Every structure is written in C-alpha cells, then in structure tokens.
Amino acid sequence: MVTPEEIEGALHLPVLAVIPHIERRRGALPLQGPVVRRIDLEGRWRSRLLSHFPVNSAAEAPYAALAKDLQSRSRGMGQKVWLFAGSVAGEGTSLSCMNLAITAQRQGIKTLIVEGHTRAPRISRVFRLNLEPGLTGCLNRSLTAAHAIQKSDWAGVDVLPAGRAVAYPENLWGIPAFHRMLAELRSEYELILFEGPPILLYPDVPLLADKVDGLVLVHQFGRTSPHRVEKVLAKLGDRKERLLGVLLNDVPTGLSAD
C-alpha cells in the first residue's frame, strides 16, 4: 500500500483524502429491456455512490473528514466554492464530487454540486436530472440559479446541471452573470463543489481558479504520473497557488458495496 506521505513526496502536494476503490454493487439498479447493446456507464457509477452504504461506513470516512475540513474553512475564512478537476479524463472527478456531496449532506452541511464540465455532463445523468436549463441556461438567459437547481430524490443532493452544450464554455467564466450566480450560491449554501473539466484537455480550470476559493486536484491512484502533475502545475502557472491539495482516488483495498 502506498502511503499518503509517499504520494505527497512524489506529487509535492498535500493529500487531502485517500479514497478507497469501491466495487459496483452487482445486480443493483438493473437495466430495463430484453437486450441491451451498450455499456451502461451511468449505471456503473450510480452503483458506486455512497447512498448505497450505511452512514459512517469505512467507504464514507475519508469523504467525511474532507467535508468537515472544507466546512471549517467555510466558517472560518468564508471559503465555500471549491473547484474539483483531474489532469485528464477518467480520474474520477464526477464520482468524487457526488460522493463528497452525499456525505456532506448526511452531516447536515448544506451542499451543492455545480456540473461545470459542460462538454461531457455525467452527474446529471447519474442522478437522473434534467440537463436544462442548468448552468449554461442561467448564464446565457440571466436566470437565477434557484430556477435551475434540482434535487436528486434518492441521493438527497442539490445539483446545478450543466445545461445545454455551448461551443466555447470557457467564455462563460468571465461574464458578469457568472459572478452574480456565484454570489447567489454563496448566500444559500455552506459548501459548493464545482466540477471542472480535465485541466490538460481544456482551458477552463485556469480561468475558473481565480473565481473560486480553491482547487482540489483529483488524482486516480496508479494512473497519473508525477510528470503529468508537473504539466498541470505548469499550465496553472501562478494559479497553482490556488491548489488546496490532492484527492487521491480509487486506492485499491478490495472494499466492496456488496
């Protein structure tokens, strides 16, 4: 087992949480229809959500510790908006945001997920929410966030879905409507988890880093090399000072939801 200290030494960043690998629940949420000829990616993710686990389970513990840390920053320094992003696709950013939100809600922390990866929205699909009007609808149509936020009935989590896809979403992060929306959200929630797109694939995260209170780098265990993390830091430039640390995801322990 690689220790957090070894990871910190390799990445030169503090490890905020070590998240164990969670096996999908076999037979949970079965697909409908006689024949299915596609991979049910949303079903796989849905079966790994902590809403399938009892409160205070071993799977929940690292998320609970991180949620309390972020809540303390909210109360002490007014830091509420945290941008979560991986270096490339497949790091587990969406699942991490969903499970952290579920855990925070269980602790009584009023939490919102903002589905900021508008090019490839997954959270709204996993939670079975309507994509529109969503985030892009709020910004392009000057709607209030309250008109677009939805709650997952079975996960108990508030989500601002991505909304309709736009050609250049990175152009949205500097407009006045985005600043007004963040101010509205800050007044309503204790913890806001902003899911960003992969840092090395799109230009959004460096632009968003100045608008949020901090950045959490989602790093899948054994997948992303320290060299790739160095590329992330180089792309962030001066904004790397906004990095709070690393959420080390999918650490193999044999932990199962069955």
Image: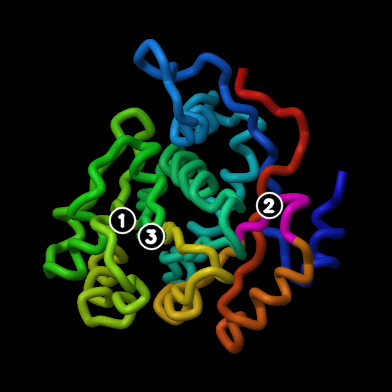
Where does the C terminus fall, quadrant-wise? top right
* Residue under pointer 1: 162
Q: How many badges with numbers are in the image? A: 3
> What is the spatial separation of the Cα atoms under label 3 and label 1, in whole angstroms?
8 Å
* Residue 178 higher or lower than 116, as above or below: below
Residue 87 percent across, percent down from the top left: 61, 65
Q: What are the residue bounds of the magenta stretch? A: 218-224
Q: How is the image coloured?
A: rainbow
State whether residue 192 appears in this view.
no
* Residue under pointer 3: 119
Where does the N terminus fall, quadrant-wise? top right
Residue 18 percent across, percent down from the top left: 70, 48
* Residue positioned most to the top: 34
Label 3 secondary element:
loop
Which residue corresponds to the image point at 41% horizontal and 54% vertical from the top-left?
A: 120
> What is the spatial separation of the Cα atoms under label 2 and label 1, in whole angstroms?
24 Å
State whether residue 43 appears in this view.
yes
| Crowd class of label 2 (few under 14; some 14 to 19; many from 20; radius 10 Å) | many
| Crowd class of label 3 (few under 14; some 14 to 19; many from 20; radius 10 Å) | some
Labels 2 and 3 touching (C-beta < 8 A): no
Which residue corresponds to the image point at 13% horizontal and 69% vertical from the top-left?
A: 142
* Amino acid at dot 3: Arg
Label 1 secondary element:
loop
* Residue 169 higher or lower than 126, as above or below: below
Residue 165 percent across, percent down from the top left: 28, 60
* Residue under pointer 2: 220
